[in-house]
Amino acid sequence: MQVITPTEDQSLSLVQAIYAVATAEGTLPLLPVERDSIEAIQRHLLHLDEPVEPAALSMPANLAAIIDAPVIRREAVRILAMLPVLDKQVLDAKVRLVEAAAAQLQVDEYGVGLLRLAQQRRFRKLAFRLMMRSVAHYWSPTGRARLRDWLDMIRIAMPAIPSIYAMLVDRGLLERYRGLEQRPAGTLGHGLFHFYRDRGFPMPGEPKSFPEGWSKHEVYHIISEYETSLQGEMLNAAFSGGNTEVLCMDLLLLSLLQFQAGFQVMPGPVLQDELRPDAFFRAVARGAATEIDILAEWDLWTAVDQPVAELRRRYKVPALRPEERQWLAENGSLLA
């Protein structure tokens, strides 16, 4: 995502669009989680000191005339696309309003299509699309899908096939990651080694490890300071989605669908009511403000010798506030 600073008129118009989607243009009451989310969105993504109330609950007919900047248009659609998931229903009436807003703003956002698949409960197709995009943009360390990356997808999708595991042992890669233990304390490399070892996670190169590119997911944990608890994973997904461009809505919608709405989209835990709006949208904002897209333009091996604190400073990662640290620590979600 991109950091946006809409004008007062643009903010008012976008807030009205947000309320229009969340209430299906006034036909449904706001749930507490929706109201809290709208306030958090205004605070963290629209940078409003005080939340504003809309002039009406209908979709603004002049939305495109007021929101004319392409970047703000795209981020507006992304914000709107998250709203129908909050009530755990993904209702057609809300999705249609998101689609209408995207059409009015002339934004072709991949996440809107994913949202429609969720509304249709076509979760297998949704998962397939997520995995296909992840193979190139997340799992591969090169940004281009390799044979090994496709085999990784098959291994994860069909874990009962033992021969796949045997094919994917990479001792050279494993030794490279084990060698990170020798990097100086406080560096990213040293921290990444201990992140794997201290949590019992298999390292890249081991037969049951995630694909090599997935190490960027672990780096996001280290950079963002969100732990691997369920709440921490949700916040890490929010930070990652806010930070990256191509897979922005893949990450944000998957997190909301699986942790908040309780839909089984991908393998892993399925929960409900995990969303803490202020923490979630703050994490999205922190990721957006981070000045390097770790999934798109970043190479782990050029940074392993750098102190983590220096990387956070260089990448302009917004620091956690004292009250955030306390809340995260109390909820087991602050990186140890």
Image: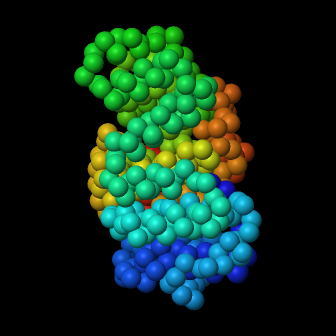
Q: Is residue 50 above or below residue 227?
A: below
**Count of numbered badges drawn on the protein:** 0
Left or right, 9 with respect to 232, comes to right
Q: Residue at x 47, y 73 (%)?
A: 21
- Pinpoint residue 88: horizontal percent, then vertical percent: 33, 64
Q: Looking at the image, what colour scheme do you see?
A: rainbow
Q: What residue sits 31% from the left and 12% below the top?
A: 163
Q: Residue furthest left?
A: 160
Q: Nearer the viewer, residue 316 or 61?
A: 61
Q: Position of residue 314 (x, y in %)?
A: 72, 45
Relative to 48, does residue 95 appear above or below in the rendering? above
Compared with 41, 274 (above or below) is above
In the rendered image, residue 261, in percent from the top left (x then y), is placed at 33, 59
What residue lies at 60% left-to-right and 63% top-to-bottom?
Answer: 103
Along the viewing direction, whichever of 97 and 274 lies nearer the viewer: 97
314 horizontally vs 42: left or right: right
Q: Quadrant of the N terminus?
A: bottom right
* Residue 313 seen by the camera: no
Q: 102 above or below 11? A: above
Percent coordinates x, y for residue 108 in the rendering:
61, 54
Residue 271 in view here: yes
* Residue that appears at 32% across and 39% down: 267
Farthest residue in the bottom direction? 55
- Figure quadrant of the C terminus: top left
